[in-house]
Amino acid sequence: MKKLSMFQVLLCGAMIVTLSMGIRHGFGLWLQPVTQANNWSRETFALAIAVQNISWGVAGIFAGMVADKFGAFKVIMLGAVLYALGLLGMAHSPTPLLFTLSAGVLIGIAQAGTTYAVIYGVIGRNVSAEKRSWAMGITGAAGSFGQFLMVPTEGFLISHFGWQQALSLLGFAALIVVPLAFGLREPHFAGGAVAKREQTIVQALTEAFKYPSFQLLMAGYFVCGFQVVFIGVHMPSYLKDKGLDPMVASYALALIGLFNVFGTYIAGSLGQRLPKARILSFIYFARVVAISLFLLVPISPTSVYIFAAAMGFLWLSTVPPTNAVVAQIFGVQHMSMLNGFVFFSHQIGSFMGVWLGGYLYDKTSSYDIVWYIAIALGVFAGLINLPVNESAIVRRAPLAA
């Protein structure tokens, strides 16, 4: 089977993830402009972003199935177009329902086709197992760099052009993904060819969901989604409520992206030498420490920036080890689909984190309860990743077609 060059896969995959993840990490900057302009509650905005995360998770499963069978090229192309349409709709939606359909459903489906599950599937099929975790770390770091690059850019666009025009400009920028998708057009999928596989989809899913370590990975990833999306969406408003300048939040989100470039790369590289499950446990326990200290010390721009840097090292550094463990256990034939299911659990957590943040704020005028939930879940995730067995699964006999 002819493969793409590793350099080509990493370059195009990293640029796609940089743009796709970079745009979505800045959505918290629109919470107050959108709700104030439309006289909506914070829960209205939070619900739309929560729906986005669920849509992303559900669509990610099917995007992974299609990408595994027919290749990632068409999936990425469709995702780019839907991303542009969703951002334009987000800018001009007059009602909460239309805002949820555009910012929630359309952009969620778009992200499923332009982010990790699909891109990591291409990496798994074209990069050797010896370099796979490292390559995933490179691509994950690119997504973090996108946050560092795009969040201040989005803040600049909002302040200089207004929130609606800023979203429209990002919509056109999302179309840059289209030419990049051609770099991930795998030769053995040319002409609509179908990949030959030893397992059917049903057999692969039955095997995975009966495997305890797969279940533990899904549960841990739920916590990851809860924590990062709550912080990413609600921290700008949390800091403004505490009397800090809005630009502090922009700089903080940018710092998270910058330091996660290093954190994600290091996590991917360490995954080549150390047990990936132990790396995941360390990340979750370290998040507990970082969040606890952030809440204990007096809040100031300095404390915010230190917290952002610490969380940056831990932000998406769960992604390469988690995806690499799935590939290591089950192989790469159904990698995008299985990672899609793991990521669906992540997105259920994301839904809960972003929606609960808005709901409890509207009920209590405070984010304190959600911060405490994030800490408790971090302890839980750190513990359940300890027993994960990342050895390749032993199949007793060849599976029937």
Image (cartoon, rainbow, N blue to C red):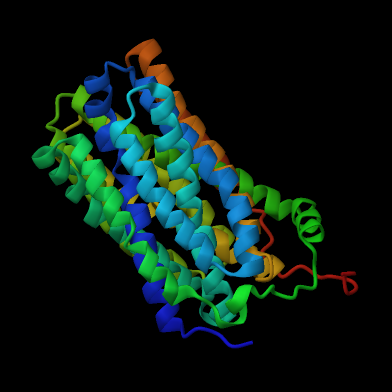
Residue 112 appearing in the image: yes
Q: Locate residue 138, reporting x and y percent.
A: 40, 70
* Residue 117, above or below 7: above
Q: Locate residue 232, reporting x and y percent.
A: 34, 40
**Nearest to the observer: residue 236 or residue 300:** 236
Give the quadrant of the N terminus.
bottom right
Number of labels in the image equals 0
* Residue 182, above or below 235: below
Q: Locate residue 54, reporting x and y percent.
A: 53, 38
Residue at x-position 38% and y-position 70%: 180
Residue at x-position 72% and y-position 70%: 392
Residue 273 appearing in the image: no
Answer with the quarter of the image where residue 291 lies.
top left
Q: Locate residue 388, reporting x and y percent.
A: 66, 56
Residue most toward the front? 191
**Nearest to the observer: residue 236 or residue 387:** 236
